[in-house]
Image (cartoon, grey):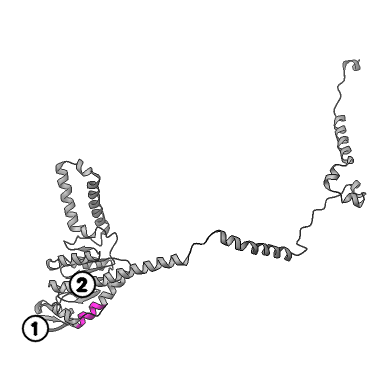
Amino acid sequence: MAKTDVKELLDAGVHFGHLTRKWNPNMAPYIYMERNGIHIINLYKTAAKLEETVNAIKKIVLSGRKILFVATKKQAKDIVARKADSVNMPYITERWPGGMLTNFVTIRKAVKKMNAIDRMKADGTFETLSKKEKLQVDRQRAKLEKNLGSISEMTRLPGAIFVVDTLNEKISVQEAQKLNIPIFAMVDTNSDPNEIDFIIPSNDDASKSIEKILNLVTLSISEGLSQRKNEKDALEKGEGQSSPPVSKTEPEVESAPEKQEATAEKIENVPEEAKVAPKKVKASPEEANATPEEANATPEKVEASPKVKTVKKKATKKKTVSKPKKISSNDKK
């Protein structure tokens, strides 16, 4: 971002402070001089603080958090709403709802109620209500839209708040301090800078001054959003290039000969002791006296030999002999 031009700030009337009798002594380091009963702000310090603020806001936007703009005074309402809408950021330009930050869960319930009314109108259930009930629902919806319509898309606490006139928005500053939310603010000579994390010493009453400061702030937010989008696109492209699609058949064809060679080497490297020997079966006395040719005979031939058959027949005969005989009545006599 280009450095802030002091002459542009001077033309916008940023240097005008409050009456000398209304000043806050803590703002003394940022006051240049007194003229016609009015304090003049040192614009060189304003430019330095503005650059520091803009860089801090850009870092918060790069992290993916939201900046909540707060300005309920008449001069700043329309400007803040227009600028915040241009960068898609939430804002409060009506009465600050008490507990907006410290009791955010309850505020979210009110927003959900507003969304439920919208769904009723879309579904057609709204038409089933009586005339009096329709009027009540419409009034409730209008009230919620006025106070909370600009924060309907804010689903969690903001990363920071930007305040115009800290004296007028004292409650919002106190809530942000309790939750340790960073506070960016346009601070005039009648405000206390010690309550603010990032101050911009400037005129917070003139519409030209407010518009000039918000132009620079929203420009940094838009730069942060575009940079974050570019980083996401670069990451997605990098992931797509790092893992190209591979055909399933190619690695199998290439690895087949390598697998065969590996298995052949394993078989050759196996020691002789580790090789499994065939199990020795105790030979029968008849097989022990057999000739070497008979010993080398196949198992099928051994099974077909008559000796084995005779053994089986003898075993069957023994079983038949063991059965008791029936004695007839003539033998008893």
Residue 144 appears in the figure: yes
Residue 227, how many percent across, how many down?
A: 32, 70
**Residue 141 in the image, given as x and y percentages of width and height:** 18, 51
| Depth order, front residue of 29/158 | 158
Residue farthest to the left, as pictured = 36
Q: Quadrant of residue 50?
A: bottom left
Q: For residue 153, which quarter of the picture?
A: bottom left
Q: Nearer the viewer, residue 143 or 306?
A: 306
Q: Which residues are magenta?
A: 44-51
Residue where numbered disc 1 is placed? 35
| Majority SS type along the magenta span | helix
Residue type at mark 1? Arg
Q: Is residue 47 magenta?
A: yes
* Mark 1 neighbour density, 10 Å: few (under 14) some (14–19) many (20 or more): few
Left or right: where 279 falls relative to 103 = right
Q: Which mark is residue 215?
A: 2
Image coordinates of residue 258 in percent, x first then y, are: 64, 64
Q: Are marks 1 and 2 in contact (CB under 8 Å)?
A: no
Element carrying mark 2: helix
For image coordinates 36% across by 69% down, the residue present is 231
Q: Amino acid at mark 2?
A: Asn
Residue 68 pos. (x, y %): 24, 65
Q: Residue at x 26, y 72 (%)?
A: 220
Distance of mark 1 from mark 2, alpha carbons? 28 Å
Label 1 vs label 2, nearer the camera: 2
Q: Is residue 180 above or below residue 292?
A: below
- Residue 25 visible from this viewpoint: no
* Residue 201 in the image: above or below residue 312: below
Which of pointers 1 and 2 lies earlier in the amino acid sequence? 1
